[in-house]
Amino acid sequence: MVSAPALAAQKAKGPTEKLCRLPGELIFSISYQLSHSVSDPAHRETLFKRLRNYAYTPRRGRLRLPAYLPAKVRGLSKLTKRQVREILYWVRPSTGMKMPLSERQLQFVRQHSTVPIWNRWSAADHHMAHKVGVPRLRKSEVPSKGRALWPSAPSFTEMLEMGRRGVLQPPAQKYGPRFTVPNCLTRKSLSDNIRLATKIVAKMVIGIRSSVEVREAWLPWFRYRHGFLILSVRYNIPAGLVRFLLSNWKTCPTNLWLVEHCPLRIFLRRHTAVDFGVYQIDTVVSGSDVSSQTEGSGVGSPPTFALPLMQEDEMVAELGEEFRNFLSGLPG
């Protein structure tokens, strides 16, 4: 388990580091290893098309590659679709942890997508400390419903991979007063009834981004996987951890992986205590209000100042024509 001095050292070292922004011209490009192995541009394009069709279509059978390709490249025919997807593109889902979008690029994507987007803003966070110090989640325990799930607020590179696989989240719904149910939950009911708050967190929160600071005392309740601290215990969750997660849900929901992604205030309007097996709102453990807790670090929150809006042609010129095709497939 990562120690407090290690976390402090990581935080102290963070400001001296700098995150490189995602190079737009490479987001749809073949990986460097494959590009370097095939020098002829025509052969490289043929290889790229064959690999894409194999990895992202429901075709059966093994991958077949032309005999004129190098023997090392033809060895890709022995790989599974999952393995091909992991090495095909220069940009992978995990690239967003190392190379986030610039502020203008992120704003442009948010203009065209109703799905909430997460973006890492600074290297001065706790991602590496959590990645090294928290035990890894086993593949068999990855959150899934028949197949592996994707974060409720994906990064741009995660959203790219979702689009390539044909996995698109439904657009965020519009909410209003007419969606409020009778006897709905309130923030006061969460503050006064820690048992109710714990049941909501256990049922609705899958995990939190690893770049968010989490107290060392709470780390045993998590396992690390793909840039997330997955909440691996669904019972006996400390009251402080429950309030910490609810606070992040209130201040910066894109930091969380939620079962039902919507703002906390909207979630409370749409649910009652009965939905979580609580039939009487009593003061079980009196605690401070969620709004008075230490707010989330905001590592995935949008910038607080407005930027000039970017036109689609301007962004396509920066990221390539294939980016226009990607935008057309976004929900919304």
Image: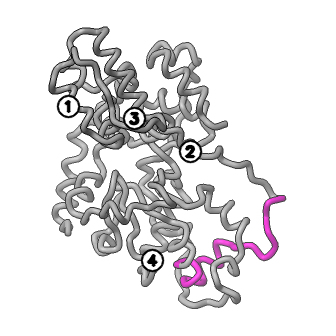
Colouring method of the image: one colour
Quadrant (top left, top right, bottom left, bottom right) of the C terminus? top right
* Mark toward the viewer: 1 or 2: 1
Q: Which of marks 3 and 2 is nearer the N terminus?
A: 3
Taking the spot 55% from the left edge, 84% from the top edge, the residue there is 195
Mark 2 residue crowding within 10 angstroms, few (<14) / some (14–19) / many (20+): some
Name the residue carrying label 1: 75
Type of amino acid at the residue the image marks with label 1: Gly
Mark nearer the viewer, 1 or 4: 1
Q: What residue type is labelled 4?
A: Arg
Question: Where does label 3 land, which residue?
Answer: 55
Which class describes the residues within 10 Å of circle 4: few (<14), some (14-19), or many (20+)? some
Mark 3 residue crowding within 10 angstroms, few (<14) / some (14–19) / many (20+):
many
User: Which of the marked residues, 4 or 2, is nearer the chain's N terminus?
Assistant: 2
Q: Nearer the viewer, mark 1 or mark 3?
A: 1
60 in relation to 64, above or below = below
Say left or right for 156 vs 1: right
* Residue 120 vertical placement versus 258 (above, below): above
Q: Which disc is residue 116 wearing?
A: 2
Q: Where is residue 230 in the image (x, y as percent from the top left)?
A: 39, 63
Element class at badge 4: loop
Q: Quick one: SS at disc 1?
A: helix
Report the magenta residues as a range: 178-198
Residue that lies at the very extreme toward the right in this rendered image: 178
Kindly identify which residue carries mark 4.
Answer: 234
In terms of secondary structure, what is the magenta stretch mainly?
helix
Pick the front one: 233 or 77: 77
Residue 210 versus residue 56 in the image, above or below? below
Residue 57 % position (x, y): 47, 34
Task: Name the quadrant containing residue 262.
Answer: bottom right
